[in-house]
Amino acid sequence: MAYRNGNYTAFYVAEPYRSNLGPYTARDICFYGLLRAWKGRDSSFPFIDSHDKNYNVRDDSDWEKTLKPRIHERISNSKNIVLFLSSTTKNSTALREEIDYGINVMGLPIIIVYPDYTEKSDIILCEKKRIRQKIIDLWEKLPILRDSMHKVPTLHMPFKKDLITRALKNGNFAVNSKCEPSTYFYPC
């Protein structure tokens, strides 16, 4: 069995790429870049980038022969998936594959970060202790997530460094020590 200590980061990138900048022009990749920057600035930040675990591929590489196998290899070496789900997220081929393979094949817990929001109360109804409808509506953007998330623990949070740090350290959201499948969040 592989040593599964990485955090696989999933985010929407428009396809096909129109230039060499390709994915780097997409909004959601900026949040992945910020995780990398936090790690670069502070080595104790608990992010282990699964994208660094095998060689990079060109964005115009063949999907079936190169890109899809790389995604599978990276996810197979990961303990969880950090998904950035925003108002600009679309149901792309790559994102569908990442979520489908991560949940339905590898059983990885998903830490869902909503970068459009910064407060816990943006995500949950604090008094009722449940997720807000506007967040549930975002799940519709990724039907594979919506239809599969009941199989693994999912942790939902706004884009806030202290909460992301807490989630990355939380063993309940790592494949080898995961808690029961359900929808979780940090209460207000």
Image: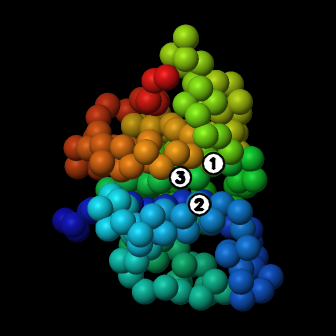
- The answer to whether residue 93 of the structure is visible from this angle is no
In front: 92, or 40? Answer: 40
Provide residue 36's location: percent of width, then percent of height: 47, 69
- The answer to whether residue 179 of the structure is visible from this angle is yes
Say whether marks 1 and 2 touch (CB < 8 Å): yes
In front: 4, or 118? Answer: 118
Seen at 49% across and 23% down, the residue is 188
Q: What count of labels does the image hold?
A: 3
Seen at 56% across and 46% down, the residue is 159
Q: Which residue is mark 2?
A: 31
Q: Which residue is mark 3?
A: 83
User: Which residue type does callout 2 highlight?
Assistant: Phe
Q: Is residue 89 above or below residue 145?
A: below
Quarter of image, res 4: bottom left
Give me the C-alpha separation between circle 3 and circle 2.
Answer: 10 Å
Q: Which residue is mark 1?
A: 115
Q: Earlier in the sequence, mark 1 or mark 3?
A: 3
Provide residue 173's location: percent of width, then percent of height: 34, 43
Q: Secondary structure at mark 1?
A: loop
Give me the C-alpha separation between circle 1 and circle 3.
Answer: 10 Å
Q: Earlier in the sequence, mark 1 or mark 2?
A: 2
Residue farthest toward the right in the current orientation of the protein:
18
Instruction: Estimate how packed mark 1 is, as few (under 14), some (14 to 19) or many (20 or more) residues with alpha carbons within 10 Å.
Output: some
Which mark is in front, 3 or 2? 2
Quarter of image, res 25: bottom right
User: Which residue type does callout 3 highlight?
Assistant: Leu
Q: Secondary structure at mark 2?
A: helix
Which mark is in front, 1 or 3? 1
Q: Is residue 21 left or right of residue 57?
A: right
Seen at 66% across and 60% down, the residue is 28
